[in-house]
Amino acid sequence: MYSRKPVILASQSPRRAQLLEQAGIPFEVRVSAADESWPDGMPVPEVPEHIARQKAKAVQEHYSADDIIIAADTIVVLDGNVIGKPADRADAINILSRLSGRIHTVITGVVIVRNGEEQAFSQTTEVHFKSLTPEQIAYYVDNYQPYDKAGAYAIQEWIGAVGIAGINGDFYNVMGLPVSEVAERLAVM
């Protein structure tokens, strides 16, 4: 369906790659070291776009101006605080215990760059976790090892099937890329 040369995905996320594949968007992956911090005082909803912009800039110098670069970053927000990737098993268990029985927000920021122009946007999805038992949390962490995932979980895994009561927004946004909006924007570039 998408007939141009491959876009450049500035992400090593297998989930983002999977979503682009599902949408029929040809791509190649290029990852360079990018600063994933953000300035003190930056409003939380702006954080994922800021980080995505840093990722895009880190790979941009390797390509020509007419190449399309897509970068994204996903954050989990609970009580106004960004919850990152867990450092270890204990941290993952702690994070999931805090999310248990609560509603949190997932924000994915996307930056698309071509010919010196940038399109930046973000999508927000609310996720409502059921109350999880300590045994369920330990099972998930031990069997799925969610150490590379913001909020210590992936909605498409076991915990999403048994532990999520509902979502308000884009499911794929929670996976890491609001692919429908990305496809719409690419279609007019």
Image (cartoon, grey):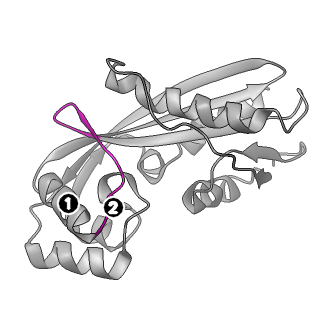
Would you call the spot at circle 2 few (<14 residues within 10 Å), some (14-19), or many (20 or more)? many
Q: Residue at x 16, y 35 (%)?
A: 79
Q: Residue 58 in the image: x percent, y percent?
A: 69, 36
For the image, the number of numbered tags is 2
- Please tell me whether residue 181 is drawn above or below residue 147 in the rendered image: above
Q: Which mark is residue 145?
A: none
Determine the secondary structure under disc 1.
helix
Earlier-in-chain disc, 2 versus 1: 1
Q: Residue at x 13, y 53 (%)?
A: 98
Determine the secondary structure under disc 2.
loop
Q: The C terminus lies in which quarter of the figure? A: top right
Q: Is residue 149 left or right of residue 152?
A: right
Q: Amino acid at mark 1?
A: Leu
* Mark 2–mark 1 CB contact (< 8 Å): yes
Q: Point out the stretch of residues depicted in magenta.
A: 77-88
In which quadrant of the rendered view does residue 120 lie? top right
Q: Residue at x 38, y 70 (%)?
A: 157
Q: Residue 110 in the image: x percent, y percent?
A: 57, 33
Q: Which mark is residue 153?
A: 2
In which quadrant of the rendered view does residue 113 lie? top right
Q: Which mark is residue 96?
A: 1
